[in-house]
Image (cartoon, rainbow, N blue to C red):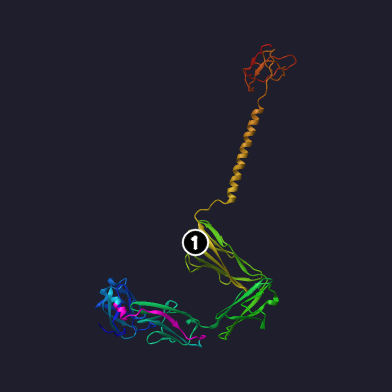
Amino acid sequence: MGAGDGILPQGPLSGAVGGTVKFTTSLRPTQTPFLSVSWSFKGVNIITSTSVNITDPGHANRITLDRATGSLELRNLVLEDSGEYTVTIIPDGGLQTDGRITLNVYGGSAVVYLVMLNYVAPITGVTISSPAAVLIEDKSSTNLTCEASGSISSTVWMKDGKSLYSSNRVSFSVDNRVVFIQPVHSSDRGTYQCQASNPVSTMTAAFNLTVNFGPHNVSIIGPSAAPLGQRVTLQCTAESVPPANFSWMFNGKETPVNNSVYIIEMLGAENTGNYTCLARNMVTTLENSTVLNLKAVLQAVRLKVLPEVTGHRGLDVLLPCELIEGTKDNITQVQWDFQRAKEENKTMIIVFNTQFGLNISESPLKDRLNMEKQSLMIRDVQMKDSGLYTCSISTFPSGSFQEKTKLIVQEQRPLSPEVISTVVIAVVLLMAILASLAYFIIIRRGSSIRPVDIDTSDLVMDVARPSVARNEDVVYSDVKLKTSRDAKPPLSRKGTKTVNDDVTYAEVVVLHRQPQ
């Protein structure tokens, strides 16, 4: 059996068929990674790691390399894995280091025999202990100790699931079972994990480290200007463990408010001024403060835009933007920015400055843009123009304001409800006119048929003369007047004039009734 050499522990290592072993180096993680880590088995390279990992196909799914320490884990052991393993590590700016160790893999009754002889005792009862103390940032120091029962071959430390490295404040004991932190910082708080391993077992323990600090980054969330008569809420925040206690001052005088929220139910002129939030940490005994100057305006200055505008390809579209102001603010600049969907950065496409005038930036929209007051006009809108448009207006003395409008471009423009209503009304009116005309024609035709009286005592019908009704059944026909030069005048009765107009007589059929 070979002995460990250099950066590897004294061997041999023992493992069971189907089990896992870890070749743990004595190296600790460094600030810069190693230039190269290479492991060989019986003189054949099984993995080399530089900027990439090159792994022997026979070990591809069975080994894991820890680039921070050079340690190697070998899983699913078989009897053929027995033999000598060597490691070569080239650090960044250091000398090459080497190590070798022998692995013996046992199967069947040999494994039971090894356990009985206590060659490898399974790890149990892993815990992390730390001195009981209240830790204060930059004032206290501490250490974490990994304890376990059994034969410990290696100990690995992690914090919040990531490998723990040494630094100017963090160091490790020789056997890597103790972590020293001096002094503690707020960034040291979190969950620490200790992983103890040997060839036949691995066990992990966790410990939550609390560091008291702060208050840091005290700030007041709330408006710096608000309309008179409006309800105003100011909220004070601070980074602190434990949570900070808050108090408020107004224009240098203490107030009865002793929590993080200060509420002004109705803002008046007497409520304007400097509001100071004071945060105190009762453990660290530190305090910090910040000030907000609250002003009153007649009406809040704001921008009025449409959240969403729909345009149609080939037509013009207007994106409204209007400054709603309560005070006599002067507009100094109007700017529009464009951001396509799924793009993080927005691009300035047009800007108007009262001093420098209108400027249209280079973009696919350049030749199709215009500004109508603060609103944006896009001519011949295209599908690619869809996206988010931001209207920014700078004023004096209120400052700058901005709102966003989403433009959606569609292929075809549907008929509006107004157009549909107009078409329906036109169709109804046309049908009414046609119905009235038809009714008028029918009435005129009906009124042109006149009854004809027949006097059977004469053989000639005089249409102009009333006659006495007979009992004969008469079939009437329309009488049409037309000029006829060959027609003879009718026989005239006594006392009547002869009519010189030509008349064409229709045939009249007289049916005599049988006497009853």
Residue at the (63%, 71%) spot, across then down: 330
Front residue of 119/363: it is 119
- Does the image show residue 106? no
**Residue 501 visible in the shown view:** yes
Image coordinates of residue 347 in percent, x first then y, are 50, 68
* Placement of 417 over or under 268, stated as above or below: above
Q: Residue furthest right?
A: 495
Q: Is residue 120 magenta?
A: yes
| Magenta span dominant secondary structure | loop
Q: Residue 388 appears at what percent x and percent y?
A: 52, 64
Q: Is residue 394 left or right of residue 86?
A: right
Give how far across and how far down residue 416 sits, in percent.
57, 51
Name the residue nearer the viewer: 418 or 101.
101
Q: Quadrant of residue 250?
A: bottom right
Instruction: Give whichever of 298, 479 is nearer the camera.
Output: 298
Question: Is the residue 484 above or below the residue 107 in the image?
Answer: above
Which residue sits at x=49%, y=55%?
Answer: 411
* Residue 113 position in % (x across, y down): 29, 78
Please give the name of the residue rendered at 61% of the width and 42% of the height, measured from the top-left corner: 428
Check disc 1: other Cα within 10 Å, few if <14, some if 14-19, many if 20+: some
Res 116 quadrant in image:
bottom left
- For residue 509: magenta? no
Furthest residue to the left? 43
Which amino acid, mark 1? Asp
- Magenta residues span 113-137
Q: How many numbered callouts?
A: 1
Check the picture and name the quadrant holding the C terminus. Answer: top right
Q: Residue furthest top?
A: 515
Give the structural element (helix, strand or loop) at label 1.
helix
Mark 1 = which residue?
A: 385
Q: Quadrant of the N terminus?
A: bottom left
